[in-house]
Amino acid sequence: MKICLIGAGRIGTVHAIAIASDSNAILHSVVDFHQKSAEELAQKYNTITLSLDEAFNNSEIDAFIIASSTATHADLIEKCAKAGKPVFCEKPIDLSLERALACAKAVEESGIVCMLGFNRRFDPHMASLKSKVDANAIGLIQSLIITSHDPEPPSMEYISSSGGLFHDMMIHDFDMACWILDDTPRSIYVAANAANNDIANQGDVDTASVIMNMNKGAIVTIINGRQASFGYDQRIEAFGETGMLQVKNVLEDTVMLSNSTGVNQAKSKYFFLERYEKAFHNELVHFMKSFQSGVQPSVNISDGVLALKIAEAAKESLQSGNSINL
Amino acid sequence: MKICLIGAGRIGTVHAIAIASDSNAILHSVVDFHQKSAEELAQKYNTITLSLDEAFNNSEIDAFIIASSTATHADLIEKCAKAGKPVFCEKPIDLSLERALACAKAVEESGIVCMLGFNRRFDPHMASLKSKVDANAIGLIQSLIITSHDPEPPSMEYISSSGGLFHDMMIHDFDMACWILDDTPRSIYVAANAANNDIANQGDVDTASVIMNMNKGAIVTIINGRQASFGYDQRIEAFGETGMLQVKNVLEDTVMLSNSTGVNQAKSKYFFLERYEKAFHNELVHFMKSFQSGVQPSVNISDGVLALKIAEAAKESLQSGNSINL
Amino acid sequence: MKICLIGAGRIGTVHAIAIASDSNAILHSVVDFHQKSAEELAQKYNTITLSLDEAFNNSEIDAFIIASSTATHADLIEKCAKAGKPVFCEKPIDLSLERALACAKAVEESGIVCMLGFNRRFDPHMASLKSKVDANAIGLIQSLIITSHDPEPPSMEYISSSGGLFHDMMIHDFDMACWILDDTPRSIYVAANAANNDIANQGDVDTASVIMNMNKGAIVTIINGRQASFGYDQRIEAFGETGMLQVKNVLEDTVMLSNSTGVNQAKSKYFFLERYEKAFHNELVHFMKSFQSGVQPSVNISDGVLALKIAEAAKESLQSGNSINL
Amino acid sequence: MKICLIGAGRIGTVHAIAIASDSNAILHSVVDFHQKSAEELAQKYNTITLSLDEAFNNSEIDAFIIASSTATHADLIEKCAKAGKPVFCEKPIDLSLERALACAKAVEESGIVCMLGFNRRFDPHMASLKSKVDANAIGLIQSLIITSHDPEPPSMEYISSSGGLFHDMMIHDFDMACWILDDTPRSIYVAANAANNDIANQGDVDTASVIMNMNKGAIVTIINGRQASFGYDQRIEAFGETGMLQVKNVLEDTVMLSNSTGVNQAKSKYFFLERYEKAFHNELVHFMKSFQSGVQPSVNISDGVLALKIAEAAKESLQSGNSINL
């Protein structure tokens, strides 16, 4: 499978390594508006750079991976739809629900394989929990708790263009909840604060707890925060009739130091690049399998639309102080 | 310190063992409406039984421990207040907030030492977390999550006279939240279900998630359930500016079995008698210290009143589907 | 069951509490050469003190618990044998193998129930491992590793009369190995050092690693040390054909603190009184059951003799630098 | 850095992925006696194949990685020495100590950078323990325990040409012990069995416990076995004056399932490819740094010779039943 990679930045490099680690994928070419970035990445893998137009006119390319900035996602997905090319795109589709819906419609009409980069679904830890849930290891789920704390807040520049905590950060957790439970929320209630003054001044929050009543009866709790002293905090707890499943944090190493202060272990892996390293490879494998079989990937553009809808309801609950029905 | 124990049932026996394990306490006498129960317990410790009247007229008795049924608590506390005797009483004061307020008034006017059996505060694990919070180990607390699942539902007879999940079970967690944070809630939102049909038919719930906004800014989440397949589930997680503190479940033993199915550990200790065994001794020690110093115990009748108030608001939120201000 | 307790010191008090916590046992009387100690303990439990002669002439007494100093053990056990009274005695029988053999002979001839205080067998954690081994949870055991580090060295006075590391400390582990494997060693090899100069000057060691080849084929490794910075270190690892069983250390509490230094837990429970608290109660229960059924207890005087024999061989290996056959 | 890879089999592919994941390394060419294997690997990375002669005559090549069979190692290292090319070679140098010594001499005389693939030193977990030891986190080490169990025995064909347990498997642990303690053994004692009859028939063992007295005073215990039901078992425990450091097993995932059987976690990662995946990348980085700086790598041919010497003494102890001085 010959892949053209659009975006040669940090996340683009991650995808390039995933391609190099997989025996069935070949990096065909690199596209980036910063030609120098494109060239550096291409050279490392003995391959070529292309302009966007050249790429969409190149018949050798089997599929596209979009790892450019959020604002370009919907346009590039639609280009793939028009060209009839399978596409993997980083989340989100767009910050605007309206724009995302239009894009989803274009994808649907084209019938292309279109996979969205909700990478956590492909993390071995999260995927193991999900497969156990599906195998009925804990019976009917009564309560699901998703905890996500970043190791430190992003820059204020990032915050200002992020769409806010719910669209930028908790959107992953909305997707996880719907995916794990195979369900959608019927109501959502939000309690949130801004511990960080700069974030408060931007009208955003950095600490939020959310309760969702799901249509099939489970109660979902999501805890989010922009700063954790002990590294990236990514945990899930599903409590069911016959058991409880938990994904624990992945620590930097397994070393335990016992001394006069007690028993001490490492911090959590720092952030998403370290924590979700395997997920980037696994999602590529899933995308290739989808491409080869023609079956739509398990996570597609409609999942992106659903998560955006929940994020909007969360914002509304925060503003009103009430529970919002979806 | 010579103690008269009122109530020779299951919880009374626990208090008798705590007294026997402490070098400074002596079991003076046992009172129970079932004379046979009283006699059996007295014989084991080479001591006497008394009627209620005899007990309150006996000048040798330094203090009372009330371990009889809930309906008798308020009356017996008031008898102690009238007699000017220090009293330790199992929670709750009463199911009725009004009756509890009257009792609290009587205690206050009498000036007696009156300690309420919110035993979890004296559990070594919970107390260790609290002391670390007070020593500023994690800075300002942003989020507190309290999880409590019983190993199995009580009898329907018990349920019907319990006052419901919030008054009977979550009342412990309301107390813990206020105690750990040294704060009170300004609003509460409840999502709850009855997974068990018998419980539903009684108009009660068995699964509940609660969010409270506290006056000083922390967000509290409480998860309760009447049934856990893996034993008594008693956990706390306090997430603060500079760290996170967690109380984990106490397992039956530390044995790990690694085999072809993975790494396997024991279940949680079965229920409150096993899990909170130490707490019953520690609360006795605290009560005796309070008696000797004349300083009111750290947990007194006003804490019982506060927890009842929150339980009533929780019930109101469940009925209305809205967040309730306190 | 009416018990006379000989020895009102630290370990005697532990036995008194065990008796008070058990509904079937009654503390009949206390004997101690220091009459004041005997009286204080008796008063706490509303009971009497006796002289040694009075005790052995008192027909009300059902059984004896010997918790006096090591030098008195063999004599007191023989007195019980002569009086035909069931006896529980703290380990060791004696520091001299010869004296222990004579005592064992007297016990055997008398036919009395005689239980030896190898308390670790009754620790819930160790007992859980043993029951899983017996239930064939890990198949044939190939390797057994026993680790035991005290939290800090005893006084030099204690060391000088202890009989040395192998007779005083590792004797527990010799017993554990034989018990868990239901086997005896055919050879033993010792490597040992004295990290502490005072201990070296007494001709003793404080750090030792031992390998024993057992008759049925398992290889046993024992690691001992007189000082651990993180509290009492009491672990076992049994590696078998189909699995591995481990007893982990019991920590002071289950609190986890995650912060910028990592994830931190408490130290191990400090020493044997805290760590083996339950074992003292459980061994009493076993002793009473043995008394009532007339069946010899699972740990008796022959186990004490076997452990002494291994300790002597260990000493010999250390001196010769060679493996010693038993 | 342009690298020629000799050996396109399983371990060669691992090195190719490590090269592709590193931004500073380029896979220049592939050599393998099976030309088809060489071609498949070369195609994946858009590069060329060479014969052995072509490779050693190609001036573009900066360094060699040797991942071919053991019997070819010493010859190929000597070719690199003659050609003056930096070389990374998988362990062992050779099964014969004599041949290894000759090869080491050739390397020394040439002055080339020659790194040996004791990959465990570059595992993040092991390296973290070592760095803490070097930072004096636990003071003087008194006892070091290294546990290594393979998930399942290799084929009898492999066993017969492996050189036996000590040369094939425990050689890693001999290297680890010397590396962690920065010391060498003065004596070694071995207890070993063959649980597997086929292995016994080959005159080899599959279960071994070893004690080494190190020159600086530490006591090293090594436990090895050819079969663990729960996956690859790779643990280390260093017990020092002021603390204990442990490397725990790396589990397949962090999921915990709590149910009526207890708390269940995943098995250990299956084998060395999964467990030491990061180590293969990290050792490449170290090799490149060594190449660039001209400083000899931290693990070189003399470490390979030392480990072989200890393995020979281990064999001698097993045969004699005595402790062997080195």
Image (cartoon, coloured by chain):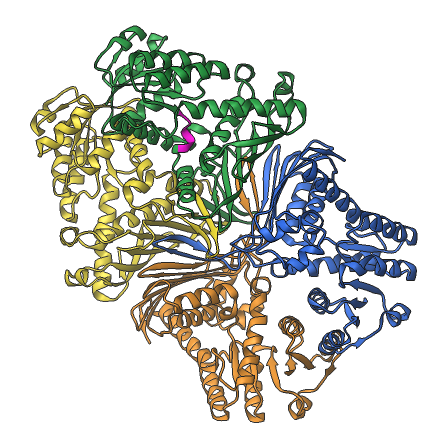
Chain colours: A yellow, B orange, C blue, D green
* Quadrant including the C terminus of chain C: top right
* Residue at the image point whose x is 49% and y is 14% from the top: D98
Residue D45 vs B98, above or below: the answer is above
Residue B118 vs A265, above or below: the answer is below
Compare residues D110 and D161 and report the one nearer the observer: D110
Q: Is residue A114 visible?
A: no
* Residue at the image point whose x is 37% and y is 42% from the top: A126
Instruction: Please identify the quarter of the rendering in which residue C291 is found.
Output: bottom right
Q: Residue furthest front?
A: C201
Q: Is residue B8 visible?
A: yes
The magenta stretch spans residue D143: no
At which x and y percent is residue A302?
24, 42
Residue D112 vs C182, above or below: the answer is above
Task: Report the number of numbered marks.
Answer: 0
At which x and y percent is residue D259?
52, 49
Say whether residue A124 is left or right of residue B2: left
Magenta stretch bounds: D117-121
Compare residues D198 and B43 and report the one nearer the observer: D198
At which x and y percent is residue C65?
79, 63
Say whether residue B199 is left or right of residue B27: left
At which x and y percent is residue B88?
56, 80
Majority secondary structure of the magenta segment? helix
* Quadrant including the N terminus of chain C: bottom right
Instruction: Please identify the quarter of the rendering in which residue A57 is found.
Output: top left
Instruction: Please identify the quarter of the rendering in which residue B137 is found.
Output: bottom left
